[in-house]
Image (tube, grey):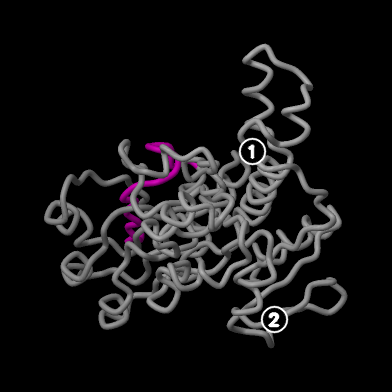
Amino acid sequence: MAYFVAVTDSPSGDDLSIERSVLGGMRVEKISWNDRASLARALREADAILCMHAPLDEHVIGSLSHCKIIARFGTGLDNINRDAAQAANIHVTGVADYCTEEVANHTMALLLAWNRKILHCHGFVLEKRWNERSLTTGNWGCAPIRRLSTQTLGLLGFGRIGRAVAQRALAFGMTVLANTRHPERAQLEGTGVALISREELWSRSDYVSLHVPLTEETRHVINAETIGMMKPGAVLINTSRGGLVDEDALVTALRAGRLAGALLDVFKSAPLPVDHPLRQLKNVILTPHVAFYSEDALLDLRRLAAEAVRAYLT
């Protein structure tokens, strides 16, 4: 009998052509559910699960009778109770390397947009103004522009994405510093990146960019204390996980001018609440959790998740 691979939700909606192509003769079906109870019922007989945001908590995992693997369309596994899966002898995996290029490019796009004041300049032109002295001196609502080669980028985390961001920043002449929990894996030789302590990273960086997973250790790694250690006028970039940042402390620092700006693609809650104070600040650039996205990345994501299921079951 063919394996039953249940798809709870996916980046492609109801299109499962890639998944079915990869999984050959297996039965691949999109299931219907609207709450945890119906999700548990729909998954009960599945041999494998492909998911994106479905809440695979202890109750749902405890109801599975045949499941051998849960593969997530994505890198993080926050919506899957991995302890419950381990107890049930169910393998859990994500797709680690489908959007490295996209996230690194988005990180640099935010940095460059801030550094060159692209949004301010766009608004300036729309106001039917031009290259007035107030623009070039920075007295029109944004700080003066600094040459990028005089600036230092600090990377918290130096995995695939951190290394890709470093490569791009170095090409622009920036000084790049990094901190990682696993210096033995850092592959720094020949990169021009200096590995330093976290405290040095805060104090020496003009831009601090986050590239670590969300764990109990890293939750709110950006908080009032760590912001207080940063160089006055530094800029925070987060294209990783919203939970890394204490948003209340960030808003306070932005309002006080302790930080010059924040460039954010991820937030504590998604979508960002309409009344969130970050929406009211002028010294931010906000994007709606799209750093991962390109059509090519989504195709890779679907294929690699399905290949993980195929490899494990066979």
Which residue has dot 1 on it?
142
Evaluate if marks 2 and 1 touch, with contact meaning CB atoms under 8 Å apart.
no
| Residue type beneath disc 2 | Ile
The amino acid on which the numbered mark 1 sits, given as a three-letter code, is Cys
Task: Return the residue nearer the eye: 181 or 209.
Answer: 209
Image-quadrant location for residue 16:
top left
Q: Which residue is mark 2?
A: 196
Which of the two residues, 232 or 16, is positioned nearer the viewer here? 232
Tell me if residue 12 is in the magenta stretch: yes
The picture places residue 84, in percent across and down from the top left corner, at 25, 77
In this view, the residue in front, 2 or 6, is 6
Residue drawn at point x = 72 percent, y = 80 percent: 195
Magenta region: 1-17
Q: Secondary structure at mark 1?
A: loop
Between 155 and 136, the one lying in front of the other is 136
Residue at the far left: name it.
37
Q: Left of 96 or right of it: where is 111?
A: right
Q: Is residue 253 left or right of residue 1?
A: right
Helix, strand or loop for the magenta stretch, by majority: loop
